[in-house]
Amino acid sequence: MYTARQLDNRFKELFRKGLVKGTVIIAAGNEASSVGMAMPFTPGKDIATLLHRNLGSHLILGCDPLSAICQYMANAQSPTHGKEGNVHFGDTDALRFPMVSHLGSMLPISVGSTWSARRNGSGAFGLAVIGDGGSSTGQFHEALNMASVNKVPVVFIIENNGYAFSTPVEYQYNCKSLADRAAGYGIKGRTVNGLDAYEVYSAVTDSLELMSSSPQPVLIESMTVRLEGHAVYDNAEYISDEVKAANWKKDPLVHARAAYLENCNADEHELAELENSLCSQLDSLVNEALKAARPDASSVSMDVFAPVKSKSVKPYSAKSVRNTNAINTALGHILEENSNAFVCGQDVSKYGSAFKTCKGLVDRFGSERIIDTPICEAGTVGFCLGASQTGSLPVMEFQFADFSTEAVTQLGVNTGTWFFRSGKPAQLLFRLPSGGGITLGAFHSGEFDGLWSRFPGLKLFYPVTPQETYEALIAGFYDPNPCIVFEHKLLYWGKAGDIEFDGSLQKVYRPRQYTQGADITIVAVGAMVEQALNAVSAKNYSASVWNPFILNPLSFEPILDSVRSTGRLLVVQEAGEIAGMGSHFISLAVQKCFSQLKCAPVLVSAPDTPVPFAKELESAYLPDAGRIEAAIAKMIGDVK
C-alpha cells in the first residue's frame, strides 16, 4: 500500500515537471481495496482485468515498479514501448490483461479467459474490477449474466468511492447497495469496508473457497474513498471541503500503518526505516527511468497485425455445393482438427443457427463446443477475446451482421487493437450473415463492411462462391488475427459450385478475378458480384470483373493493374454510397492510376437510406444488372 501511494506521489510530481503526460489517475484512498483483493490470487495462473486505480494490484500480481514508472513516462523501456497511455498496461503472458477506457468492456474478458483456462485444465480463478460508475454500463450486466449462466468462478469487485469522475453515485444507481444486484444473477453478493485491506482480503478468500467447491461468480462491493480528484489535473472542486477533510480522516494507509505497528511486533523506528528504504528504492528507479531513451518511431513496431506463418491444412474437394454447405463443412473441419476450438452465438446449437449453417454440429461435437449464448453480442465478443488468451480458439456467429453494431467497442476498439497494445495475437473468427434481397427490412439486411474496415487490426473476408467461402472460413480461423467473414445471405442458397482446396492457406490471400476484358474493370463485393457478371454476360461486354475478397488489409495492386490496362473503373456495392468501401476503391484508383484513366470512375450503390422492407421497395433499392449495364454503356461508349 505504501509503495503504491509513493508511486502515485512521484507520478504527480513528474506530471507537474512535464515528464509524465496523459491521464495520470490518482489512486490515493484505494490502496487497501486494491492490495487486499489481489493478494489471494496466484500471479501467472489466475486471470485479472484491472483498472486505473489498481496500481497496488499490479504490484501484488507481479508488476515490476520500474516497469510501471517507465509506462507512465512513455519511454523506450515501457511495457508498451510508449504506444499506450500510462494506466493502459498489463502483461498478457502473466494473465493481467491491458485495460481500455471503455471500462465495462474489460469484464467479459475475465469471464471468457477464466472459462477457457478451466476448460483447458487450469484451476484458474478470475478477478474482474469495475468502479461504481462502470457498473452502470451494459457490459457489466452482460459479463455477470454470462458468468452466472456458465458458472465461471470470477470475483467481480465494484470499487465504490462515491464518484464516477465528478458524478456522484446518486446519479448512478438507486438501489441500497450495488452488491444487492447479485441476487438478480442468482449469485452471492456482499459489501465490505474497502478501507481495510484485511477485510477485503478475507472477503475474496471466502469467495475463492466457495468457488472451489461450487464454481460460480461472486460480486463484492468494496466501499472506498477517493482522497483527491479523478486525475492529477482535477482539483475536485465539486466536492465540499468538509467532505474532503472527512475523507482524509479515513485514509486507509494511516489505518494500515497503525494496524501494522499494533499487530506485527514492530516499532515506529523500524517502520520508518522500512518506509525510507522503500522511498529510496523508488527514487532510484525513477532516476533510472529518467535515463531511459525516448521511443524511436523508426524502431518501435506499429504493426496492428500479427504475422501469418505459412501453413497448410487438410485439402478438401466437393462437387456442386452451395455456400451453406461450404460453411457447415468448414466449421466441421475446424472443430474436428482443433479440439480447443468452439462455436458460439445465438441459436447455433440445437436450432443450427438462423440460416442452418451450423445444422448438425452439436450432434457431432456436443454442447460444450457448440454453445448457445445469451443475447449479448458485446459480451460474447469479449468472452471470445478472453478465451483466445487462455488456449481456446473461438468462432463466433452474429445472428445478423446488423447485430454486430452492438459490439463496436468490444470488437473494433478492444479486440482489433489487442496485438498492437499487448504484443500477443488474438486468434478469433467472427461470422456475419450479411446483405439484403430476402425481404427482412432495415435491421436484418445490412452488410457493414464499410464500418468494420475503419478499425485497424481486423481482417475482413468477403467471399462469393462456395470455394471462396470455404477458403475464407478456413484461412480466417487459422489466421492469428481477429478475422471477420461476411456471408451474404442471398448467396447462402445461390449458385452451386465445386470446391477444390489444396490446403495451402497462403494462396487464399488474394483478390479474385472472374472474367478478363479489355474495355472496363468492374469491382464488386457480395451479391453484387453475381449482378455484375449477369450484366457483362447479357451484353457480352469485354470486362474484367473482380472481387477484392480480403477487404482489410486490402491487396488492391492486381486490380489497379487491371484499371491501368482498361482505363476504366466501375465499382458496384450493395451498401449506400457513404456506407461501403467503394469510394475507397475509387480513391486508390485515382491516386495510383490517374494518368491511365480514360474517364472518371463510377460508383453504383444503393441509396443512403435504411433497407426498405416491402419486396417492391427493396428491389428498387438494391443495384441490379440493369443499372450496372447502363453504367457500363455510359462509360465505354461505342467501344466493342
Image: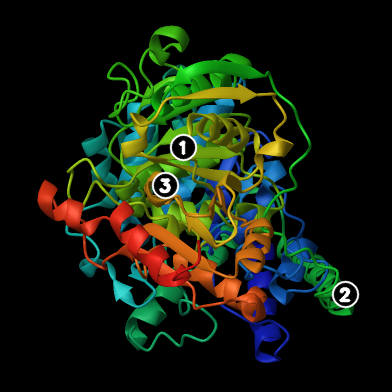
Tag 3: residue type?
Gly
Describe the element under mark 2 as helix, strand or loop. Answer: loop
Residue matched to label 3: 526
Tag 2: residue type?
Ala
Residue matched to label 1: 111
Q: Residue at x 68, y 53 (%)?
A: 305
Tag 1: residue type?
Val
Q: Earlier in the sequence, mark 3 or mark 1?
A: 1
Q: Residue at x 72, y 52 (%)?
A: 423
Foreground mark, 3 or 2, reads: 3
Residue matched to label 2: 292
In this rendering, position of residue 557 left or right of residue 624: right
The N terminus sits in image quarter: bottom right
List x then y, in percent, for residue 473: 54, 33
Q: Residue at x 62, y 79 (%)?
A: 594
Residue 400 position (above or below residue 339): below
List x then y, in percent, for residue 433: 36, 40
Do we see residue 131 in this rendering?
A: no
Quadrant position of residue 7 = bottom right
Could you tell me how far apart the alpha carbons at marks 2 and 1 are, in whole angstroms?
37 Å
Q: Earlier in the sequence, mark 3 or mark 2?
A: 2
Q: Earlier in the sequence, mark 2 or mark 1?
A: 1
Q: Residue at x 72, y 60 (%)?
A: 303
Could you tell me how far apart the alpha carbons at marks 3 and 2 are, in whole angstroms?
51 Å
In this rendering, position of residue 496 left or right of residue 425: left
Q: Nearer the viewer, residue 284 or 122?
A: 122
In this rendering, position of residue 633 left or right of residue 64: left
